[in-house]
Image (cartoon, grey):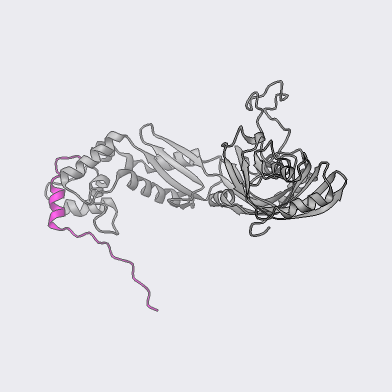
Amino acid sequence: MPVEEPALPSFELAPELLLAASRLKSTPLCAECLGRVFGRAGHGLTNPERAARLVGAVEGLAPVDGAGCFLCVGAFDRWPTWIRRAREAASPYEWHRFTCGSRWDPELLAREEALWGLASSAWGESARAAFNREWGKRLAEETGAEGTTQGGEILFVADLLVGRVEVTVAPLYVEGRYRKLDRTLPQTRWPCRKCRGRGCDACGRTGKTYESSVEELVAAPFLAATEAEGTRFHGMGREDIDARMLGHGRPFVLELRAPRRRTLDLPRLAEELAKSAAGRVEVEGLVAAEAASVRRVKEASPWKSYRVTFTGEAAVEKVKEAVELVPLRAIAQRTPTRVAHRRADRVRTRRIAEVSIVAAEPGRFTLELRAEAGTYIKEWVEGDAGRTEPSLTELLGVPLSVESLDVLEIHDTEG
């Protein structure tokens, strides 16, 4: 197969292009900015190379030094300084892919657009775009890292107004599944309602309602390994604090904010987590993830299987008759009283596909059931003062009280 030859530089000095260039004779422009007025005309040349061709073809057209440039005021002459400042700003962090941006004086950008109008040029390229591109090329050559327009691990922003480089470090994501065995753990850190996390007498100066959470137990070894500033925990739904999460576990994504270290030994971290959270939380299937994983996990609505034990003065035969009426019958659930402070008050329609009695003794029953995502199982049993219709309490005609609840399975792809 013949080797494809690289495209030759293309920059045709057409009459309309030369006429546009002649209108710039009295405007002091550096070679970079002069060439950029025609930056989208042809390909394969740098802006200074375009300027050189124009200068050779238009009498009286000559570039000035960068410091005297009407548009950039020498911004394109200071690459070593921008590269040094970028490396200094990013020195605390590990990074392999980066994105470049810049912040310009709006007056300079307005001048540029006015200049395109003066020259009647339809080929102008933005100073910001050209600066970002060229800075990215030079930074890649200097560091060996990969420049990209999206998905970078660190974003460099050159503030040309103050001569500073700012960095934004992209989060690091780890995906897995957790089982919660402890009925005292919330899924995420729960700030104290009195002090809103600041620390007060009511919370023992911890700023928390609960001593720990699934998030904190899972995140601990990752925070130590990455030296991240903090975490966010994204679960595929959540179980009640006093409910266990069993089976294959609940899918989650751990987001590590502004990590200083990005290279993770996941098997070793899994071992550390197994030891530190033993008896409370179990995690499996840890893999590196991307930001898109958060949306996938948060937007999923899989059905779930539960085991619920409740008490109440009901006969076994009556319970059997009641649960036979349940499968696929519409259940109207108004936002439960216990979560009304944080969820919109509205009525949601849910379904329970199947119910079976797995244990029964006088006054105490255990059911296993499979329900649509978002079904409030405790409220379906107890009725929540009529906010769930029909409830098992309503069907039996006696008050019921949930003793324990377990999530047996999340029926996503793996569960």
Residue span colored magenta? 1-28
Q: Is residue 151 left or right of residue 75?
A: right
Residue 3 belongs to the span the image colors magenta:
yes
Rendered location of residue 261, percent (x, y): 60, 45
Identity of the residue drawn at 29% across and 45% down: 126
Q: Main secondary structure of the magenta part?
A: loop
Snapshot quadrant of residue 239:
top right
Identity of the residue drawn at 16% across and 46% down: 119
Question: Could you tell me which quadrant the C terminus lies in?
Answer: bottom right
Q: In this view of the protein, which residue sits in the foreground, 191 or 113?
A: 191
Q: Is residue 76 left or right of residue 361?
A: left
- Determine the residue located farthest toward the top in the rendered image: 201
Question: Is residue 85 depicted above or below 293 in this figure?
Answer: above
Q: In this view of the protein, which residue sits in the foreground, 117 or 191?
A: 191
- Residue 260 in sight here: no
Numbered disc total:
0
Rendered location of residue 412, percent (x, y): 64, 57
Residue 251 belongs to the span the image colors magenta:
no
Rendered location of residue 104, percent (x, y): 34, 37
